[in-house]
Amino acid sequence: MKLSGSRAIALFLAAAFAALDAHIGPLALALALDGCTQPYMGPILYQATTPDCPFWVDGSRFELPQGISVFASPPRSIGAHTLELSLTYFIPKGAEATFTNQKFVITLPRGSVVAHGAVAFVDRRVSGLPDSKAELLSELPLILHGELGGDETMYRVDIDFVGNVPDRFDFTPPVMIIGSDKYPMRTYTYRLFKQRQAYGLCT
């Protein structure tokens, strides 16, 4: 059977593309797989496992991408009317995290805001240096950098809440930007442990 000119050209081009695909297909697949990364699977965002949050915990670490993490330490009372909550941000060498805002508030459990906090103390320490000392900062930086000279940079932040706070409350630090993406933070949960006569992290 004699093919028309256009039909012959179409068959020729189809065969040529099929041959080309057979040669570059495996390479393209390999490149695609090589560029593929595991999606970030964040840990549990709400710390309390039951509404009454009966169990004391000594601290709570929240893992973020790029090896960044945030650790909440047990709160402490200052005088009769101030409760201080402490966070430590761990930023690996070369990484950085940016605050979307620097508003620190506590709320009723899964509820409305009951108190606004003020940053009372910030220091920074770079681990992995021969003489690693904490450096007092005058304010909380908007961008937390992992200094290149050390292994990890730790920013400790103390937030003071003045006035009466509920026996049970939540604390959610501001959302962070890592890379070009925003990441919500864990809601840390607290309650008054009457037998200890102290507030503590609970689950």
Image: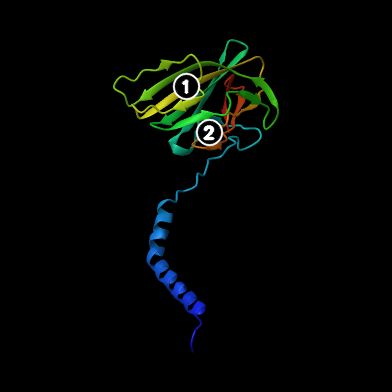
Tell me residue 99's x, y (percent). Answer: 54, 28
Q: Secondary structure at mark 1?
A: strand
Given this view, does label 2 or label 1 mark the residue nearer the observer?
2
Number of marks in the rendered image? 2
The residue closer to the viewer here, 196 or 153, is: 153
Figure check: 84 above or below 148? above
For the C terminus, the quadrant is top right
Q: Mark 2 falls on what kind of element?
A: strand
Foreground of the two, 30 or 9: 9
x 40%, y 26%: residue = 153
Please, which residue is most extreme toward the top here? 79
- The location of residue 105, given as percent across then percent down, is 63, 23
**Residue at position x 34%, y 20% in the image:** 132
Q: Residues within 10 Å of mark 2 (few under 14, many from 20)?
A: some
Q: Which residue has dot 2 on it?
A: 177
Q: Is residue 13 above or below residue 32?
A: below
Judge by depth and name the residue closer to the eye, 134 or 194: 134
Q: Which residue is mark 1?
A: 156
Residue 175 x %, y %:
57, 31
| Label 1: few (<14), some (14–19) or many (≥20) C-alpha neighbours in 10 Å | many
Give the percent coordinates (x, y) of residue 74: 52, 24
Residue 126 numbered tag:
none
Can you see residue 83?
yes
The amino acid type found where label 2 is placed reads Ile
- Amino acid type at circle 1 is Arg
Q: Residue furthest left?
A: 130
Which residue is at 70% across, 30% downward? 111
Farthest right residue in view: 112
Q: Nearest the camera: 165 or 52?
A: 165
Q: Is residue 59 visible?
A: no
